[in-house]
Amino acid sequence: MAEIQFTKGHGTGNDFVIVADPDGELDLSADQIAALCDRRFGIGADGLLRVVRSRALPEGAAALAEEPAAEWFMDYRNADGSIAEMCGNGTRVFARYLLDSDLAELPAGSTLPIGTRAGVKDITRSETGFQVDLGRWRAEPGDPLVRAKGLPVARPGMGVDLGNPHVVVALASEEELAGLDLTVQPMIEPEPPHGANVEFVVPQGVKDGIGRIRMRVFERGVGETLSCGTGTAAAALAVRDWAGAAAPDFWRVDVPGGTLGVRMFPTEEGEHVALSGPAVLVFSGVVALA
């Protein structure tokens, strides 16, 4: 039975199994990934980050074409083994692993580009750990309805595309947020073709020019997680849209696993959104592959 080395890391409780495969020699099946991420019989995680050089896999060609300095590609898989386009918390944990493993450098004031299936993401250092520029975002047309256990009636949501799909739903109170049973997958009508993460949010006003939100999330292919980086950004974008033109561009989002920062800013190609927060490596080990 083959063995591989791994590291466990997390960003505000959104946790990952990290596997270094610089030359793209490791072919993990969906079943193997699900076994590694299993919280009772495996290491336990919301997903797996494979650390691979962009030149070593087909998807990395697009990253290198976009940014030749994007040496490393984040091959992200959900806990069920399915492929995901992006993971905001994962990019910060990925960057922490590269730096702590001496695979990359990030001097103060510089940028570390990382390839993903949703394009190249630029990482910089921040007061709380790392900031990732998630790039441009898009509001999806339509008004999907979301049914969730614990909500008496379906609620309208806003679709937000950040390279991966989200539907954000506003709730009336923290009590309503706490009463959700997210052991049951929320249903979206109409159902998105590739599924979506669903964020349930309670806006908490603006203090010192910073908007505040509380959030819980159900991630496709995973279930409820303690945090979702791109979901945090989607939540801030949706609440800002609902609040109108006077809403701020800086947001603090409290999730069960901690607090993340979101910032919207203009660029030549359109508005970008950035996510900031901590990234922690917990332990490393060796595990047998089934």
Image (spheres, grey):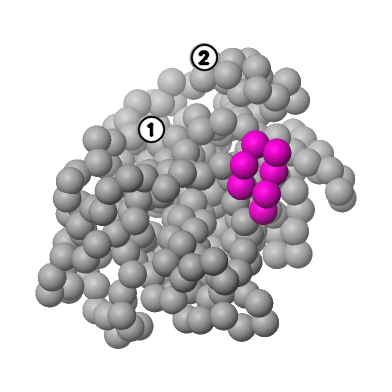
Percent coordinates x, y for residue 189 in the rendering: 17, 50
Q: Residue at x 78, y 41 (%)?
A: 111
Q: Residue at x 46, y 71 (%)?
A: 243
Identify the residue position indicated by label 1 in the image: 83
- The single residue placed furthest to the front in the displayed view is 245
Q: Does 61 appear in magenta?
A: no
Q: What secondary structure do most residues of the magenta stretch adopt?
A: loop
- Magenta residues, as a range? 265-271
Q: Compare residues 234 and 35 and report the one nearer the observer.
A: 234
Q: Compare residues 238 and 131 and report the one nearer the observer.
A: 238
User: Mark 2 is on which residue type?
Assistant: Pro
Q: Does 268 appear in magenta?
A: yes
Q: Residues within 10 Å of mark 2 (few under 14, many from 20)?
A: few
User: Mark 1 is on which residue type?
Assistant: Ile
Q: Residue at x 51, y 20 (%)?
A: 59
Percent coordinates x, y for residue 128 in the rendering: 70, 64
- Horizontal side, residue 222 vs residue 64: left or right: left
Is residue 150 visible in the rendered structure shown here?
Answer: yes
Percent coordinates x, y for residue 34 in the rendering: 32, 39
In this rendering, the answer to whether 146 lies above or below 267 is below
Q: Compare residues 179 and 273 and report the one nearer the observer.
A: 273
Label annotation for residue 58: 2
Percent coordinates x, y for residue 274 in the rendering: 62, 52
- Horizontal side, residue 76 vs residue 102: left or right: left
Q: Secondary structure at mark 1?
A: loop
Q: Secondary structure at mark 2?
A: helix
